[in-house]
Structure formats: structure tokens, C-alpha cells
Amino acid sequence: MYLSDTLVSGFTTQQLLSTSWCPAVCAGTDQPRHCSPLSLHHICTRVSASPQLLSHILVSQLKFVLGLTVPGISSPLSIIYTLEKIFVQITSTNICDLVMSILIMAMVFIVKELNDMYKAKLPVPIPIEVIMTVIACGVSYGFNFEKRYGVEIVGKMVSGYESPMAPNVEVFQESAVEAFPIAIVGFAVAFSVAKVYSIKHDYTIDGNQELIAFGVSNIFGASFRSFAASTALSRTAVQESSGGKTQIAGLISAMMAMIVTVALGFLLEPLPRSVLGALVIVNLKGMLMQFREIPYLWRRDKTECVVWLGTCLGAILLGLDLGLAVGLGVELLTVVFRSQFPRCSVLANIPGTDLYRDRKDYLHIFEPKGVKIFRIPSPIFFANIEFFRDKLVEAVGFNPLRVLRKRNKALRKIKKQLQQKDDDITERGLRDLVCQTTEESYTNMEELDQPTDLKGLPFRMDWNAELPSNVDVPRVDLHSLILDFSAVSFLDISAMKGLKMALKEFIRIDVNVYIVACDVYIVEKLHMCMFFDDEILTSMFFPTLHDAMLHVLEKHKDDTNKGWVLRDTRL
């Protein structure tokens, strides 16, 4: 599932501002969770219950509240075009519709606040929506609002249901292209709303189960020529705010809709459409509160805030289908960014324990001289292998390849000068050697990248000792490098090649490299890809970081006697 909570939040908030695309006008039988065609669960678990949905709903209800006639627009920028048409006709606002809507919204808002304040004392919440609907129907019928004030009412309602029939196969070929994005967006909307209310009321949802339910609903409904099943956020918000939170509430809602459709529809014919719009808008208060997530996300995680805003703005401006694609694109980019540029760190030991943490987070740590512990908290693959190598060089403080080339160049100078000397070589003599000029060119760079060949020297070469004045070789105090692979879940072929090259660069300058806590699957893959050779050995791998550190300290006991002492804390 690629619909994150942040993406879902941004996606549903937008829908409150307009409903130019709302596949869920399904006879008002929406539930806080459910409804969607096809099993698209794997596309949709990372969309947020979002502001885009809120934006579409609010804009779509404005024309009813103001009593204006505005045609539906479903193209990109539909919200902007719809608002333009509304403001062009704003002087034609039906005052009766507007006043009635304001009064109903104020009354419903006040009663809902009282329901929240006294919910512990009330046996059931006051059904203010039902009460206002009944009153509005009676007043509209008694005062004949339709003819006297030009109020648009629900009007004639067709009762009963269509007789079942087999789907028209010829339509499949013509509608397949349009049906696929509708199915994706329909499920994304439905799952987003379900996820919002599942979090609010603390229950779990199964995306695959939702998809199966949508598929069965649409197959059955298509036989009766019904609309495609989905979710209308407005009706879901009304039901939830009225106290409906379970499957039983959905069942009762569906039964009520069936009764109205079959027998009682005529009673709702005088109901003004502005009343319905007002009830929808006032019940979106809870969803509108999602805008408060913006400063919270910005303070906690700016990347998540970008996903929220990108999804919301994309769906508002481009529509739900393209907006969902934009949201998923932004979210996938953040995943790529986070995996390509992980937060690498240098670890150190916490005194008296076998724990190793980022040395920046602690004041009192054990960090033996000549040892570096480097941790990368992500998979290593083709996109971040160079970043890994750069961060490794930054952590150790030198470029091993540059050091290797410098040493090989210096060794060539020393060997050539030694061949011209007949005197015994002493430490003093080595310092006074006159080396060849630096103008000599070394065209074969591959030779400089090979391991340093110390054969034929009459003395042991110590690169950290004092060298001739014109031999410039960087000093390397590091003797052991430990790579913590506990958070590395996989390596691809490109990463293996880059890792192998990086390890050899350190090994060739006499730095012992150890890899710890590596997953068994990765080790098996390294064997299959011929990762090991004469330089990179399986003995470099240790099961835990502490085991590797104890091995290093034992191996360099003489060097560490003057430094830190690390206790063996194994039980």
C-alpha cells in the first residue's frame, strides 16, 4: 500500500472544497468505511484522508447554498472554473436559500457542540440533522418556497428499483480506458475516508477486504443498473457526526435509504437543496480540522508536510485522478530521496556496555584510537552507493584511493633512488635520499591503484614515520574500519561492485575492514556474486558489532593499552 497517512490526510481535505468528481453519490448509502470497485489495495495505502476531497465537496455545495445554477466541470482546474462561475453569478444569489442555509448551519453547529459537551449525560446524541430536515420539509411545503421564492427543491423522486438485467458487453470496450482511472481514484477516495475514521475510532481495516467488497457490490449493483459503489465523504461525515460508527450504522443507513426509495420518497420532495448543502458543509468541520496538521507536520517532518501539500494542491488544481497521481509521485520521490541520502553516522561505545550509538548524541563515550565504526541505515543500491562511499571517506577523514596512489608514487621514487646508492641504508640515509623530480609523469594510473609492492626494500616501510622532505604521503592513523550493516536490507549488483572497490581501497593501505551484523541473505548473495577473493575474505564478517570490536582490541592490544579499555560484557 502506497497511501500514507499524510497523503490520505492531504487527499481527503482537498475533496471538501469541491466535488466535481465524486463517484460516491450512491443513493446516500455511504458508510464510514467501505465501497470501492476492484482490488487496488496495493496502490492505495499511502494516500492521506485529504483536503482535496474537502475542497471538492465545499465548492460543489456552494451553488446549492447560494441558490445558483452552475454546470458541473470535471476537467483539470475545475475548482477554479467553478468558483469563477459562482462569483460571476454572485449577484443572483437566492436570499431565501442563503438565509435558510446560514440558520441551519448555525443551529446544527450549536447542537453538535452541545452533544460533545454533554455526551456523558445524554443517552443518545440529539439527531439535529433529522430534526432540521423534517422542519425544512414542512416549512418549504407550507410556504411553497419553490414558487414563492424560486428555491430549488429535491423534486420528484422515482420510487422502486430497476428490474435486473445482464450487463451490456458492448459497453466494456468503449468504457475500459475511462473505467480504470475511475476505479483507482474511487478506491483511493474510499480507502482514504475509511482510514481517517479507522484512526479516529480505533479499528483496523483490511484494504484487500475492502476491494473484494467493492468488487462484489459493483458486480451485483451493475445487474440493477445502479451507480458504481464508492464513498461520499460528505454523507460519511454526516453519518459519523450523528453517532454512526459501526457496521450496524451502515446497515441501518442502507435500510433507511431503501425505505425512502421504495415508499417514503415523496415526503422529501419539498426539501430545499440548500438545506442539504448546509448540512453537508457543517458536518465537514471535523475534516476541516485536518488543516491544523500543516504546522504540526512542518515542525515535526518537513518532508511529510511537502507530501501533504503536494497531494492537496495537486488534487485541488488537477482533479482527483491526476491529483492522486501527483501525490503518489511526490511520495515516491520522498522515499527515493530518503533512501538515496540516508543519515549515516559514526558510532562509539557507551562505557561499560556492549551498546554502540552515534557519538554526536553522547558526551561520555569510548572510542579507541585507530578505530572507526561507520553505520549506514538503509539498503545500499545503485542510487546511493556513491553517497555511501563519499560519506565513508568523510567519516574516516581521508580518501584511501588518494593515499594509495601517493604511496605507490613515493615508493617508486624510493626504489629508483635505492638502485643508484651503494651505501648501506639507514634511517638517516632514507631521510636524506634525493628523489627524482616531481615532473616525472605516471601515465599508468591502474598501476598506482594496485596494492603497494614492498618487495625488494632492505627495511620495513612505515608510512607514518618521517619520510624524505620531497616525499608527500598523507598520514593514516586508522588501522581498523568497522561497517555496521545491521540496517542494510539488500544490496544490488551495482552496490556490490562499488562496495568491493571501496573495501579494497582501504585494505590496500593496511586498514583492516570488518563488516558486522550483516543479514544472512546478503551474505549468501555476496557468495553467489563472487564478492570474495584474495583480498576480501569471509573472516571480515562478524555477527555483532561488539564481537568485532573485541577482536580489534585483542589484535591491537599493544596499541590500545595506553588508550581506552573496552570491557567484555558478554554473558
Image (tube, grey):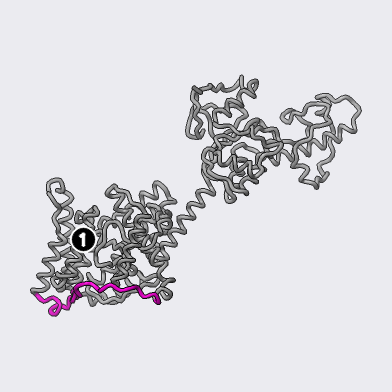
Give coordinates of residue 229: x percent, y percent.
31, 65
- Work out which residue is located at the far bottom of the displayed protein and give it: 147
Of residue 6 and residue 240, the one placed in the foreground of this image is 240
Q: Can I make out residue 14 in this image?
A: no
Of residue 28 and residue 63, the one placed in the foreground of this image is 28
Secondary structure state at the residue bearing disc 1: helix
Give coordinates of residue 386: x percent, y percent.
61, 47
* 415 to the left or right of 217: right
* Residue at screen point 83% across, 44% down: 440
Q: Which residue is mark 1?
A: 253
Residue 455: name its quadrant.
top right
Give coordinates of residue 299: x percent, y percent.
39, 47
* Residue at screen point 56% across, 41% down: 521
| Residue type at tag 1 | Ser
* 102 to the left or right of 560: left
Which region shows up in magenta? 143-170
User: Does residue 505 belong to the magenta stretch?
Assistant: no
